[in-house]
């Protein structure tokens, strides 16, 4: 099976939950390495296939697995293998009821979510990243302002994701915003690292802009599709950025 959709489609989170429920082996191809040996009876999920050059040894290792083990390949670009099933962005987009469920969870208000979900679904097309960003932003607004603020999204000039990242960052408390500002320049970190770098004493998620890294045992990071936008919205000067990276690398 192949799963192909752009950043923010929710591929990694969906596949992680699917793999956990089925005791499948899930591998994030962050470093371009493919596991040398796998159990031939287990389903293997390889996420981030677009990071493998098609003329490199990593991709050749993937091709050797096709037809040998039950395999799910996930990436942002078309994957040139023969697959029994191919899932794309259309399969991953939320239905209106799923948009409602995300919104109800974020607002902790089922009745309020029921009123807002149709407009939110129409404005976002059910794209998971946009639904998550908008739901988190609306949750930080006074309940009386949510409907009007949501309708204003229809007049946004430019990419909706960039706008939603901006308004959500503005809605964060100062300490949260400063934490996100620095984390956007770092790899995934755990609580001990966050404390040592004086980023926060209580490392936790601020979904969907700070999330736990799948299979990393308590590390958190800014998702890759949002990093550049956050760096632009909350810039660090070069001296501050260099000092932060040097402190992290020296740990």
Image (cartoon, rainbow, N blue to C red):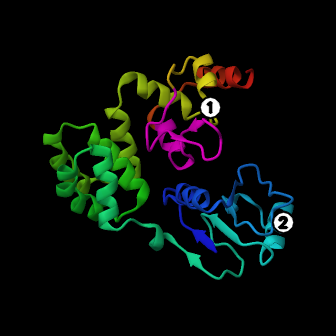
Please report the residue visible at 48 percent of the width from the left and 43 percent of the height from the top.
229
State left or right for residue 113 relative to residue 72: left
Residue 78 sits in quarter: bottom right
x and y percentages locating residue 8 in the rendered image: 49, 56
Is residue 160 in sight in this rendering?
no
* Front residue (pair 111, 230): 111
Residue 163 within the magenta-colored segment of the rendering: no
- The residue to which callout 2 is attached is 61
Q: Residue furthest left?
A: 144
Q: Residue at x 50, y 58 (%)?
A: 10
Q: Is residue 36 above or below residue 147?
A: below
Q: Which residue is rendered at x = 70% and y = 22% of the image?
A: 246
Of callouts 2 and 1, which one flags the residue occurring earlier in the amino acid sequence?
2
Q: Is 249 left, or right, of 231 in this rendering?
A: right
| Front position in the image: 117 or 159 | 117
Contact (Cβ within 8 Å) of mark 2 with mark 1: no
Q: Quadrant of residue 100?
A: bottom left
Magenta highlight on residue 231: yes
x, y percentage for residue 50? 68, 62
> Residue 17: x percent and y percent?
55, 56
How far, Cα to Cα, is label 2 from label 1? Answer: 30 Å
Query: Which residue is pictured at 42% across the width and 28% down the height?
Result: 177
Q: Quadrant of residue 194?
A: top right
Q: Secondary structure at mark 2?
A: helix
| Number of marks in the rendered image | 2
Q: Is residue 94 left or right of residue 107?
A: right
Residues in magenta, as a range: 203-232
Q: Which disc, if any, is residue 189?
A: 1
Task: Rate crowding at label 1 as few (under 14), some (14 to 19) or many (20 or more) other CA atoms within 10 Å.
Answer: some
Vertical relation: 185 (above or below) 30: above
Report crowding for label 2: few under 14, some 14 to 19, many 20 or more residues within 10 A (C-alpha). some
* Observer able to see residue 52: yes
């Amino acid at each position: 099976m192949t799963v192909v959709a752009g950043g923010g489609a929710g591929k990694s989170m969906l596949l992680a939950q699917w793999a956990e429920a089925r005791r499948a082996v899930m591998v994030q191809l962050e470093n371009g390495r493919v596991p040398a040996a796998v159990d031939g009876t287990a389903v293997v999920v390889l996420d981030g296939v677009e990071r493998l050059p098609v003329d490199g040894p990593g991709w050749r290792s993937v091709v050797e697995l096709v037809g040998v083990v039950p395999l799910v390949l996930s990436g942002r670009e078309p994957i040139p293998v023969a697959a029994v099933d191919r899932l794309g962005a259309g399969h991953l987009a939320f239905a209106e009821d799923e948009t409602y469920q995300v919104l109800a969870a974020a607002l902790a208000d089922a009745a309020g979510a029921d009123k807002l979900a149709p407009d939110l679904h129409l404005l976002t097309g059910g794209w998971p990243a946009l639904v998550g960003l908008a739901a988190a932003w609306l949750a930080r607004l006074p309940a009386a302002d949510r409907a009007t603020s949501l309708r204003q999204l229809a007049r946004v000039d430019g990419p909706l994701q960039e706008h939603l990242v901006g308004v959500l960052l503005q809605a964060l408390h100062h300490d949260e915003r400063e934490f996100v500002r620095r984390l956007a320049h770092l790899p995934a970190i755990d609580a001990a690292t966050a404390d040592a770098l004086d980023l926060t004493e209580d490392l936790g998620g601020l979904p969907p802009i700070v999330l736990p890294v799948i299979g990393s045992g308590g590390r958190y990071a800014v998702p890759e599709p949002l990093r550049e936008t956050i760096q632009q919205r909350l810039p660090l000067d070069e001296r501050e950025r260099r000092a932060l990276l040097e402190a992290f690398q020296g740990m």
